[in-house]
Each structure stands twice: as structure tokens, then as C-alpha cells.
Amino acid sequence: MRLTIREALLSFRRAPLLSALSIMMIAFSLFSFGLFALVAINFREEFGQVEQRVELQAFVDDSTSVMTLTDGVGVAAGWPEVERAAPVTREEALTRARESMGEFRDVFDAEFLPASIEIQFKEGFRDAAAVKRVADRLEAMPYVNDVRYGEEFVQQLDAIRTVTTGTGIALGTAFALVAIIIIAATIRITVLARAREISIMRLVGATDGFVRRPFLLEGLLTGLAGGVLALLLLRGAYALVTRFEFVDALFLDSAMALAGVAAGGTLGFLGSAFAVRRHLKRI
């Protein structure tokens, strides 16, 4: 093991420019993917805030008692899609209407606005299908006259969610594939640069495992270094964008940052393993 570590570290000294090139290629590949991830995270955060506006109002008959209204709220609160269910009396509806439309406050009175059940949805249940299920259950209640939830608005959110999810998967996959191809090609150049060394090791009886181990460790260290550099570049880009507070953006949390560095090490290791394996087959 000590020999493997020594050989891996010596390889950086033997070809510093090639090692630096490998680290930078891995770093820029992961940096590109990280930029895409940051955009996706921040878009998801903003979209989640818009999704929180998905609410439902079930207006009840004027003859509905407070007890009946409270019972209906209790039933709705137990549904899996519902995060919060609350009764809205006529007086509360009047107060809200006058606050939201101050210049027309005198137009509204308590007789004009009906009581209702207000529903807020859990995350993951703010799509059109889930909202429609809740609306159908409420409409089945004998004292509910009308249910409103902005059907067109919810359907538009569904369309945006579908498009962005599909686009995100496609672009994310493309970025990942490009990063893997670049990393594998870069590490292959490193292996080919030491082809003579590998041939000599094979001639003196070295096993494939003995030949492979220093390259695998070198690939791992190169990938980790590239991951760290990519994280520093990403942090710099984030600081530049948010420096003047034009954009209130989120950055990667600690777990995602560590995962990015680990991904660099993994890609370096796998790319090195693939390149060495192909080269050993040809000798």
C-alpha cells in the first residue's frame, strides 16, 4: 500500500502539467454541472413559493351552523393531501375582503359573503389532480354550495412543473455525460503518457492489480482535487452574483457540497479504472 501511495504521488511530480490539466478539466466539468444544479435549486425554491399559493375555498350554505362547519373542517384536516383546514366565518370573510379591497370596503357586508372552509395543501399534493380530488370530496358534502381553487392557475403550474422537470433531467443528464466523457478522455491521456512505464512493469512480472492500483489512486486524488477546485469556483461565481444583492440566491448545503467533491473523486477513480483496463488489454 505504501508503494502504491508513493507511486501515485510521484506521478504528480513526474508530469505536473498533465496532472494540472487533468485536475482543471475535471474541475471545469463539475463546475458546469454545479452551475446547472445551482440554477435548478434556486428555480425550485422560487417555484415552491409560488406553489404555496395553491389554496381551496369551499363555500357553505347560509344555514350551516358553526358546529357543522367545524365538523367539516375536522374531516378535511384528516385527508392526506391537506396540510391545514380552517373555518372562515362570515365576519372573517368580511374583514379579509375589506382589508384586500380597501377603497371598496363599504360595498361588502356580512350578508353578502358566505362562510367557507379554507384548505391549504401539503408539499407534493399541489398538482391539479390532488387538488381536484379534494374539491370533489368537499363538493360531496351536503352543505357545500361551491368550491373554488383557481383551476386554470393550478393547471398552469402543472404545465410549468412538467416542462421544467423534463428539461432539467435532459440537461442534467447531458451535462453529466459530457463531464464523464471529458474526465475519461483526460485520464486516458495520462495513462497513455505512461504507457512505456506500464509495459516495463508488465515485462518484469507485475500483476494487473499491482499496475492498476497507483493509477486508481492517482485518478481518485485527481478527481478529489478537481471536485474541491470546482466547489471553490462555484462559490466564487455565487459570491459574484450575490455581491450587490441583485439576486437572493441559495447555495449548495454542506451535504451537496461534499457530494460534489465525492463525485469528482468517484469520476476520477472510474475514469482511471476504465482507461487502465483498456490499455492493459492491449499489452
Image: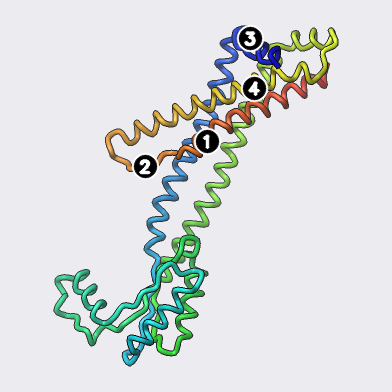
Residue 249 is marked as 2
**2, above or below 158, in the image:** above
Farthest residue in the bottom direction? 63
Q: Quadrant of the N terminus?
A: top right
**Residue beneath the point at 25% across and 77% down:** 92
Instruction: Mark 3: give few (<14), some (14-19) or many (20+) Cα within 10 Å.
Output: some
* Image location (x, y in percent) of residue 2: 68, 14
* Image location (x, y in percent) of residue 133: 51, 74
Residue 33 is marked as 1
**191, above or below 79, in the image:** above
Rounded to the nearest whole Å, what is the CA distance between mark 4 and mark 2?
33 Å
Residue 219 is marked as 4
Identify residue for label 3.
10
Instruction: Mark 2: give few (<14), some (14-19) or many (20+) Cα within 10 Å.
Output: some
In terms of secondary structure, where does tag 2 sit? loop
Q: Nearer the viewer, residue 234 or 169?
A: 234
